[in-house]
Amino acid sequence: MADSKRFVNPYNFISLPNKKAKAYLDEDKHYGVIHYSITTKTPLFIPNSSNDNAFGCKEADHKSYDFFSYTDLSNEKNVSGKYQEPVVSGSEMRGLVRNVYETLTDSCMGILNDDYPVKRIGAKFKPGLLHYEEDGSLSLVEAISIRIGESAKHPKEMKKFEDGDKIYFSNHEASNGRGMIRKFSKNEGVYNTCGYVIKWGLGVRKEHFHVFKANNKVVKKNMEAAAVKNMMDAIVTSYIEQPSIKSNDEDAYKSYLSSFKKFIKGDKEAYFPVNYSVVGNEIVSIAPATFSKEVSSRSLSDYAGVFAPCEEELCPACDLFGKIGDNAKGSRIRFSDMYVEKLDSNKFYYVKDFVTIDNLSSPKISNVDFYLAKPKNADFWTYDYYIERGKIHLYDGSLRGRKYYWHHHPESVRFKSNVEKTKLNKTIRPVKEGITFNGELYFDGISKKQLNQLIYILNTGKDGLGLKLGMGKPLGLGSVTCSVSSVEERKIVFDQDKVKYDVSSYDYSNITYGNVGFSASVQKEFEKIAGLNSVPKKYDICYPKTTSDYDHGFEWFQNNHNDKMPRNREEMKIKLALPKILDNDISLPQTKMESRNKNNSYNNNSRTNNYHDNGNRKRKNWNN
């Protein structure tokens, strides 16, 4: 019986070992080809990107794709009813096998990016001004935030201002920052006090303009301009990239970021209005709003430590698959494209003509509940600090490991017939369960150890293990099993002064995980998450959700944090972390929305929530 009160998150993490392995020193060389096949255990989809509206969908910004084939669809208006022979490209298989090879050989995380994790936190940021000193150094000074009264009644006059513009006003109107400015000018000498404009009011009917006035107390000196730029760029970009953002909000964010970059380059006044928060008396976070997001001090690859992509000394994966950039090395293996076993007409290979799938999103590395290992006894944690009993401790966050998706049971993968077409989802033509593709992996001068390791990965189906391929993995798509049919080794021999290839069959019958030199520390975790039946059938495999009919996807994370709105960072809490792969119970509880109104849409835009009113208004909502 299905358990409607619990679910399994679609992904988990295989733990990183204590140290990264070095490239193998074996000097024997082998040449030849591995003949293998993959068989779909759930529907599979790999897009033909030559046409991003292959099915002629009329909904704005909604994309639709046919399955990958050798047919150029760029001139097609609608391919409905026209079926091409599906192909699995060699590059798709190369990416899959490399990812597994990196994991099983304790290699680097080859595709890790340099993103700076961004997370919303429960701290009220203070008004401040970035300031270029006379010596060219960058400082942050405290500021007073003063509202420009009835700014919506002066649209023509206010349109003259950009974020960061200098403005003059009467000092007595804004005594101690508790007044409201009604008379102002861009011209010097009209009034006796100056400040710097910052625009607010995104997502609401009336715009709000504020002035940040410096009080000359320095918060931090000698800030690195490039780091400050990266911090603000990451936060504002995270808002702009939200699929649900309104066009006027997007324009306002872009305008603020453009003005900020001009300031950093030295093209504006020597002051620029920002908001800031100090963590542990050391880390200073810069943000565009009073209640905003916090950027980690380092990039994701920095937190990966020695498992960041190789630079000088190569790991086993980079040595075999190759790497680009500095210390580049060519690959010694090549994956061919894979072709279907002939069964019937092309139509036979597909689930149906086309289907619209649920929303897919990019990885949310800001969800530290799942992406970071929980520090011992921590109530709350981020990439840079954790909180234990109300006290902040600075530390370097520890990544959970390498991300893998659980396999869905085939019968649980069903396509709905009434999914609304939006810019957040896609219409696709997936290959159905039970279709086999055949292909080859050519190897050129690799060691026997490397050959056996590749054979094991491409033959994991015999052990009841599956791998994940293509798009839609969180929805259950892309589970495949791999099977090796034969291995041919080619040797150069001399026969009566003639050079010939001697092709012989390579015996791989006794290859196992344990005898090919793979990592012992990750074996159990890999075998469990690669197991086709590891997740009990009673659990839905889905992203976190509540039992509310109006769940917007992020409400589970709200419930997983504080029961009430935290007043400061020290009150932040995380109730549940993601279970580990080897835990007996890998499920999580759904939580019921009790006190929230179903009409509350929880806009993720930080500037919609009555900011910059000197604490006189209550903050309404925030989310992950």
Image: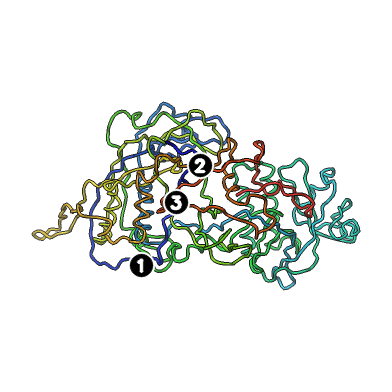
Sequence-first tag of 3 and 1? 3
Three-letter amino acid code of the residue under disc 1: Lys
How many C-alpha atoms fall within 10 Å of the one at disc 1: few (<14), some, or many (≥20)? some
Task: Pick whichever, 346 or 110, lies toward us.
Answer: 110
> Marks 2 and 3: in contact by CB < 8 Å?
no
Alpha-carbon distance for marks 3 and 1? Answer: 26 Å
The residue that appears at 43% across and 33% down in the rendered structure is: 414
- Secondary structure at badge 1 equals loop
Residue 86 image point, x, y percent: 35, 36
- Report if residue 190 is visible in the image: no
Residue 380 image point, x, y percent: 58, 58
Say the numbered circle drawn on residue 505.
none
The image quadrant that residue 249 belongs to is top right
The residue that appears at 42% across and 64% down in the rendered structure is: 310
Q: Which residue is mark 2?
A: 360
Which one is closest to the eye, mark 3 or mark 2?
Answer: 3
Rendered view: 15 above or below 418: below
Say the numbered circle drawn on residue 12.
3
Three-letter amino acid code of the residue under disc 3: Asn
Q: Which residue is mark 1?
A: 22
The image quadrant that residue 172 belongs to is bottom right
Residue at the left extreme?
496
The image quadrant that residue 228 belongs to is bottom right
How many C-alpha atoms fall within 10 Å of the one at disc 2: few (<14), some, or many (≥20)? some
- Secondary structure at badge 2 equals loop
Residue 454 image point, x, y percent: 29, 54
> Marks 2 and 1: in contact by CB < 8 Å?
no
Q: Is residue 73 left or right of residue 145?
A: left
Sequence-first tag of 3 and 2? 3
Residue at the top extreme?
81
Residue at the bottom extreme?
135
